[in-house]
Amino acid sequence: MRRIRFLTNRHRAPSTNTALGLLLAFNAGAVNAGGFLVLHMYTSHMTGFASQLADGMVLGNVKLLLNALGAILAFVTGAAVCAMLVNWGRQHRMHGVYALPLMLEAALMFPFGLMGAITLTWPTPFAVPLTVLLLSFIMGLQNAVASKTSGGSIRTTHMTGNITDMGIEIGKMLYWNGRAGSAPMAVRHDRRRMRRAGGLVGMFVLGGAVGALGFKYVGFVCVVPLAALLLALSIPPLLRDIPRRGASLS
């Protein structure tokens, strides 16, 4: 429990950033892959939605344009809400400043897991069901958490950057330095960076497999254990902050 509490602490270390990132990558992979089985789209894939937005404008396809615009706005709003919650926690000197957005994410995932089938029929102004906007908001919220905790070096909802990092480090590892093997200009790969990127990709894929199997055989309720994981990360540090808040108010 003590280690879990430090994962969302305002005082960060590379090890805690990586540990939190791995757990969030698993969660993102599960939600993303499971959502694809239901919605036939990846709700964390903002690159695709940005391209879809351009296609909709060029083709004059209003439905396509609104679909992409809604997902992008929901993702941006989630990231913005995360920033506001984290900054509020910092100003109030909370220990678990990163627990607040994870608590919100869990609070949104619980009803989605219990009523996901209903939200598929709820219309929105963006030509997509509420489910798409909700999952995009959640992905934006979570990605901002990982970005803020690590100073932008860890991405959990999309793997393009992590796979690029792996490729860079593999290229450096395979590079033959020749006579410059011991010189200051010799090329050396960053083992820690390569392990971190590989771990994030692996956890995302593992989470995707679990999410796909869960949505296929269990349905929306498989999201509930994922929400419980987020609660396990967020509740301990928030409980630690309650006595401090009570003392400040008194």
Image (cartoon, rainbow, N blue to C red):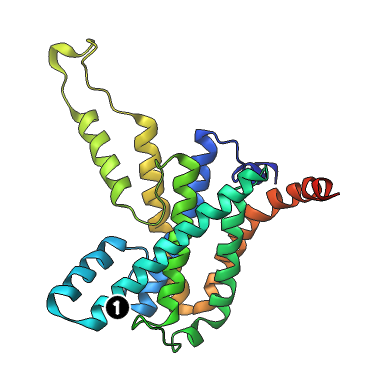
Q: Is residue 238 visible?
A: yes
Residues 130 and 32: in front is: 130
Q: How far across and down, in percent of the image, does residue 7 sit? A: 59, 44
Q: How far across and down, in percent of the image, does residue 17 sit? A: 50, 41
Determine the residue positioned at 44% across, 78% down.
131
Q: Amino acid at mark 1?
A: Leu
Residues 160 and 196: in front is: 160
Q: How far across and down, in percent of the image, does residue 240 sit? A: 75, 47
Residues 137 and 245: in front is: 245
Rendered position, 237 above or below 16: below
Q: Residue furthest right?
A: 250
Rendered position, 22 above or below 28: above
Q: How far across and down, in percent of the image, does residue 53 sit? A: 23, 70
Mark 1: secondary structure: helix
Rendered position, 87 above or below 217: above
Q: Which residue is mark 1?
A: 66
Where residue 72 sits, quadrant-wise, is: bottom left
Determine the residue positioned at 37% across, 63% down.
44
Residues 45 and 86: in front is: 86
Q: How many marks?
A: 1
Classify 10 Å Cα crowding around label 1: few (below 14), some (14-19), many (20 and above): some
Rendered position, 148 above or below 12: below
Q: Is residue 210 visible?
A: no
**As drawn, is 91 to the left or to the right of 214?**
right
Determine the residue positioned at 33% across, 52% down.
159
